[in-house]
Amino acid sequence: DDPMALQPLGPDEVSAVSLGPADLIKYVMDALVQKRFEVLLGFAAAVEGGKTMDFVGQLQPGAFSSPEALISFMDKEARYRTMLRISEWKPMGQCVLSNLSRNGQQKLLVRPATGNWEELYLNIQLVPYLEASKRWIITSMHKAGTADS
């Protein structure tokens, strides 16, 4: 057993009481470092119709039916290709909450093992979960350019 391996979370562990915005972002980003794209999809808002980008050009991970489909898309989009090779990440400040603390945006820096830091924004939302609970999910992400551009 690898002590650095991401541990699966149970239903009680993903509610907003147990997994706040910073916890969600850490869990998902640590999963991406481990190439566990299914974790990102598991915390992504479902998007009907397969529309991969929202109206402002942000990637909607919930539009993809499988980790392989998401990986294929990212591989074809130069600005998201770094997401396939992340070896390190760090938050830039706190998650900024809005809409009575039901929405949030976290600015991060990400980089591959051999490369420069690049900006990534994760947008999150607090949604109903189970009978009387709520949980944080990722609605979209935006990566500004590449370190080479």
Image: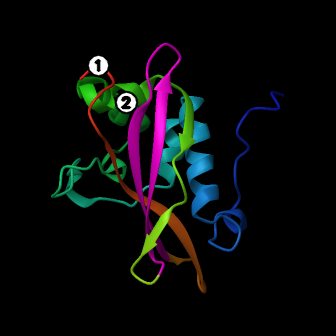
Count of labels shown? 2
What quarter of the picture does the N terminus occupy? top right
80 or 98, nearer to the observer: 98
Q: Is residue 130 left or right of residue 126?
A: right
53 or 26, nearer to the observer: 26
Q: Amino acid at mark 2?
A: Ile
Question: Which residue occupies the extreme top position in the image?
Answer: 114
14 or 86, nearer to the observer: 86
Q: Is residue 27 left or right of residue 116?
A: right
- Write down the region rendered in magenta: 101-127
Q: Amino acid at mark 1?
A: Asp
Q: Earlier in the sequence, mark 1 or mark 2?
A: 2
- Above or below residue 129? Residue 73 is above
* Image spot of residue 42 (x, y percent): 50, 52
Which element carries disc 2, helix, strand or loop?
Answer: helix
- Residue 16's disc is none
**Residue drawn at (33%, 34%) of the image:** 69
**Residue drawn at (71%, 59%) of the image:** 10
- Residue 148's disc is 1
- The image quadrant that residue 134 belongs to is bottom right
Q: Is residue 67 left or right of residue 149?
A: right
- The image quadrant that residue 21 belongs to is bottom right
Which residue does the numbered mark 2 point to in the structure image?
Answer: 71
Q: What is the crowding at mark 1: few (fewer than 14 residues within 10 Å), some, or many (at least 20)?
A: few
Q: Is residue 115 magenta?
A: yes
**Residue drawn at (53%, 35%) of the image:** 32
What quarter of the picture does the C terminus occupy? top left
* Image spot of residue 100 (x, y percent): 44, 84
